[in-house]
Amino acid sequence: MKKPRIVIVSSLMVFLTLVFVYIRLNKESDQKESPPPTASDLTAKAKPQQTAPPILPPVLAPAPLKRGNRSFYGTLPPALKDIKDLKLVNKPSAQWQKKLEVNLRRLGGEKLKTLQVSPQESYIIPDGDEGRMVERVIVKLESKDGEYTSFFAEVDSESGHVIKTWGVAIPEKARHRH
Amino acid sequence: MKKAWMPYSLCKIKQMATSIEVVICILLILSGCNPAQVKKAGLRSDPNLVNQNLLGKAYVYEDDPVNATGKQQPPFFDISKILNRDAQQITPVGKSTLTNDCIFQQKVFLFFETDYDEYIDCIKVLSSDVPGIAPLQSNNGNWIYPPGSTEFYQVQAMYHSNKVIERMMNSVSFLHDKLHFGPKSAPPSVPYRLAEMGTWWFKYSNGVSAMTQTSQLNVYSTITTEALRNNAFYEPAGNSVKLGWTTYPGYKPGDPFHVLMVEDTSIIYHEMGHAFMTTFLNYRNATYNTNTFSWDPLPYQAAPYLGFYSELGAIGEGVADYFSYIINQRPTLGDWGFGTFVFGRRPMTEDSPQHAPGISSLEDERLSYPDYLVYEPAQPQLPLEDVHSGAGLITSHYLVALTRELQSKCFIDHNTAVDYVMLAMADSFAYLGDMTAKGTDVNKTSRFLVNLHPSAAYDWYYSVRPISMRRWSQMMAKNIYHHISLNLCPLFSKDDSERLLDMYGLLLFRHYDDNGTFSDSPSQTTTAVGALTTYPRFDSYATTITGGGIQCPFVGSPGCTNDFQIFGSNYPNLNITPTTIQPTAVEEVNRIKSVIVPKASLVSKPGGLFSSVFIDDTQAFGNAISSQILFQGRVISPSVGLAGPEYNNGNNRISPGEIIAIGLDLVNSSNIPIGGVTVLATPWAHMKIDPALSATDKNKARPCSINGFPSFTEGAVECGHEVLPPNGARYKPNSTGVYPSQALHPVCLVQMSENNETRWVSQDRFRREILQLEDHQCLGFGTPDFTPAECLTRFMPGNEMAFMAKIAPGLSYIETLSKPYADFNASVPAAQRIPLSDIPGPASSSILVMELNKWIPPGTNFTCRLRAQFSNCSDCFETAPNSMNEFTDIEYGGHKPFKIFDLNFLVIE
C-alpha cells in the first residue's frame, strides 16, 4: 500500500528533529562532563568549525566614517549628512612630526637623552562644528639618568601640538624607600 | 725546550694530571648545565636526536628561590638548584620561535553553543627590547637551554606569562557565560560579542587601525639597562612587559646580575595583571564598521595608570598583585625580586609578618581606607605616597580576602572563587572604562550611562571623574550583589559583601548606583530652573518587566524570561513608566569602619586659600617641572613668546610671563583622615550665557554665583542645570563665531572696573575691552585648545589636576607627609636621622602648572575657581545627606559634587 506523501514528509521531519535533539543532548552532556579546555588543549586540536549564523551586531558606538585614508571618529555635526562636507580646521603638514619633536625636546631639556616618535594612525576628530586632522603616535623617552617612559599621544597633523596623551608606562620602581 | 730533559715518568704524570684537570673541567661545566635534569630527559646524550616527549617543552623554575626552597635565600644563592626536573610545555608543538597562541571561547545564542576566537602568536618573548634582536629558535623542537642563559630566561618568561593567559582565558569564558546567559538582575557591561570584537585581547581582527601593530603582547625577559634597575614595566604603548634586574650593594657596571626579575614568578604574574586589567577597561572600546564588517578600535583607550600618584594607579597595582595570588595562591609579591636587595616585597594578607604590629586579619585590624593610605610595610612609621603602597595594598588585601570569603561561604575551590572575583572586576572595569559611554549592550537608546558622552569620555575618564577607590568599590559591590549574591552564590550575601568592604574602610557609598540614571539626567527627581524649565530624571533601569529579571539581548535567547528590552527601542525614552527607581541601598548597620566626612572639612589654611599655596617660580624649577611632567606622560605646551621659564623671577609671587608650579597645601579640619583628594583646574560650567545678548556677542558669558562668589552686584548670575553641557563641549566659538550656550569654561576670572563698580568677568572680555589684545597675543593661540577666555592666565592643559593620597586629621597635606619624618628625626641621634633629601614628601602629581601672559598689567586681580573632591566625602556624591540620588556625569561638569576653592591672586611685577 502506497503511503501518502504527507506521511513520508512528516516521518522525515520527526526523524530529523529526533536526530537534532539527540545531537544537542550529547553536546550538552559533553559540556557538563568535561572541564573547559585550556588554550594549549585547543591549540593541539583542530580549530572548531565556526558555523554560527551571522547575527547582525548591535552598534555600540557610531562606526567611523572615512575621508580619504582617514577615519573620522565621532559624530558629524547635526547639520551635515556627509563626511565630505565637513570643514577642516587644519591641513596636514609634512612638518608635524618635526615640530612635535622640537617641542618634546624643549620640554625634556637637558635631562632628555633619547626621543623616539612612532606614527601609528592618521584620522579626523570633531572640533566644534568642524573637523581636525590628527595623528596618533607612540612617544618613547629616555633620560640621561636612566629614566624611561612611553605613552600614546594624539597630535595635530599640522602644528604637531599634543592634544591628548594616555597609556603611560607603568613602572614597578617605587618612590624613595628607607 | 724544557720538556726534553724531563724524565719520562715525570712527563707522563704531568700529562695525566693535565688530563684529570680537563676531565674535572668538563665535569664542572656539565654540572653547571644541571646534568641531573638534562640526563634524565636524555637530550644531551645525542644532541641531534629529536625527543618526541620533549617537543615544545623545557625545564624551568616553577617558583622563585625563596619560595621554591621555603626559606629566604642569600643574594648569591645558586639559583640553578631549583630547576624543576619535569619538563613543562612551553609552546604548542611545532612552534619554531618563542611565541604562543591565545584562544578565547564564548557561548553564543541560537543553535551553536560556542564561538571561538583564536589569535596566533598573541604573545612573543624576546630577551630585550633592542631593535632587531633575533627571536629565540627552538632547540630540536624543544626549548631546553642551560639555566642562567638568556635563552633559558626567555623560556622561563614564556612559561609563566602563558600560565596567566591560559588562566585568564578560562576566567573570561566563565564570566562571559555567567553575565550573558540566564535571567539577570542587572545588565552586563562586558560585551556579548567579545570574541567577535577582539577586545578580549589587544586585538582588533581585520581592524584598520594601527592598534593591530601593538596587538601582540611582547615580553622582554632580561633587560639590564639602567631604566630597568630595580624595575619592571607594563607598557600599554608598546604593549609589552619588561622585566629588569636588581642592584646590590657594591654593584658596578659590568658586574654580574645576581637577581633578575624574570627569576621571580610573582613579578611576571603582576605585570601580566596590568596587561589584563587594561583589556578589562577596554572591553567595550570598539565600534562595528558596516563597511568592512569588522570591529574598529576607538582612537584612544582607557589606561590603568595616570603616570603619577592617583587612586586609579593604586587600584591597578593592587589588582596586579592579586594576579600573582591567582596563580600561586601565595599572598606575597616579590619575595626574591624585590625582597633580596631592595625593600619592595609586598604582602597581600594582614597576617603577613611583613606588616607592622597591630595589623592582623581581625575585623578591626585590617588595612583600611583611609587610615593606611600612606602606609608602607618597609617603613610603617614613615609615610609614603606611592601607588604600590597604601591604596594599592588595601586593594590587594581586599581582593585576597574576598576570594577566601567566597571559597569559605560558597564551598568552592580557589579557582572558582577567582572566577567569581574576576566576573565582578571585569564587569566593573568594562563599565568604568567605556569610552563609547553606552555602558552596556542592552542600552539601545541614543543616551549614555557612563563617562558622559563619547565626545567627553576621554576628559571624564582621565580627569573629571577618574576611577577612585570609592567608585571602584561601589561598582564591585554592585556586581557582587547582582551576579554573585543574587545568582551564583546566595550564601555570600549582600551583608557579607558589605561587611567585608567595611573591614577595609571601603563602604564609602550609601547605595549601589544601580538604577542606571542617564548621564545627562539631573540626579534629583526634578530639577527646576525658575518657573519655566524643568529637567526630569530618567533611570534607564526603571522599567519593570513582566516576569522579572532583565532581558537577554536577543529574542529567543536561552534563559530569557521575556522578549522585551529593558530599555531602548521598545520604550520611547520620554514615556518610560516609571521614570525613576531607587538604587539598592547599603545596610547602614554594616558601616562600622568606613567613615565619611563632609566636604566642608577640606579647608585652606587660616588667612585664605593663598596662604595654602606654595609657589615655585624659579627658572630652574620652570625647566625641571616640564621635563618631570613629560616623563609622567603629560605634555604641556607653553605659549612660546608669551610665557616661559625665562620670565620666572624666583620671588615666590606671581608675575607676568611666568610658568609656575602651584601646590595647594589643603588642610583637614575634621578628626577623621581624608583620602583620595583630587583638585581640578579643568574647564567647568561656571558661566552662563546671557540670553538677552545676541548669539555672537562675546560678552555673553556671565559668572555663576557659587557660594556667594561673585555676588550679583559683581556681575554674577544664578545658574542651574541648564548651564551643563551634555556632551562636555568647551567654550570656544564655532566656525561662524557662535559660542555654545552650554559649555565648560576656563577656571580663571579677572576683575574689571566698570562704571565705578567692580565686576568679575571673563578674560576674553577683559583682554578686548581693557587690554585690546588680539587673538595671537593670547595664551594658547594656534593650538586646538585655544579659547580667548583664557587669554591671560591658564592652567596648562596636560597638567590641570592634582592628587593627594591623604590628609591626616588636623594637618595639612604636606604636614601629613613630612611631620612623621620630623618627629622621627627629633627622636633619634643625629647619625640616624633621615637627611632632608631622602624624605619623599609630596609626589609631583600634587602640583598644578600655570602660565601667565607677559601682557598682563601688574596689579591685575584674578580668581581661579578650582574644584576639589575626596573619596570618603559624605556630600560630594549625592544631592543631599542620606539622599539616594547620586550625582550624574553631567553634574560633574558643574560645582555640586565639589568643594570650590576660589584662588585669588594679584599679578605683581
Image (cartoon, rainbow, N blue to C red):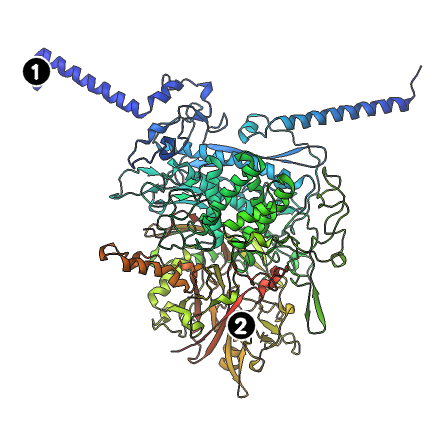
> Which residue is the extreme one toward the right?
A1
Viewer-side residue, B57 vs B697: B57
Q: Is residue B32 above or below residue B596?
A: above
Q: Is residue B225 above or below residue A159?
A: above
Residue B478, image x and y in percent? 60, 49
Q: What residue is rendered at 40% in x and 78% in y? A: B908
Viewer-side residue, B614 vs B811: B811
Q: Which residue is mark 1?
A: B4
Residue B422, image x and y in percent? 55, 41
Residue B384, image x and y in percent? 38, 54
| Mark 2 / mark 1, whichever is N-terminal | 1
- Kindly identify which numbered label has been placed on residue B500: none
Numbered circles on residues, count: 2
Dividing the image into 4 quarters, which one contains the C terminus of chain B? bottom left
Q: What residue is rendered at 75% in x and 39% in y? A: B556
Q: Which residue is mark 2?
A: B789
Viewer-side residue, B901 vs B701: B901
Dividing the image into 4 quarters, which one contains the N terminus of chain B? top left
Q: Would residue B589 be visible to someone looking at this image?
A: yes
Q: Is residue B880 left or right of residue A109?
A: right
Q: Quadrant of residue B524?
A: bottom right
> Which residue is the extreme one toward the left?
B5
Q: Secondary structure at mark 1?
A: helix
Viewer-side residue, B100 vs B833: B833
Residue B358, image x and y in percent? 40, 49
Q: Chain of mark 2?
A: B
Q: Secondary structure at mark 2?
A: helix
Kindly identify the amino acid type of the residue bearing the numbered disc 2. Answer: Ala
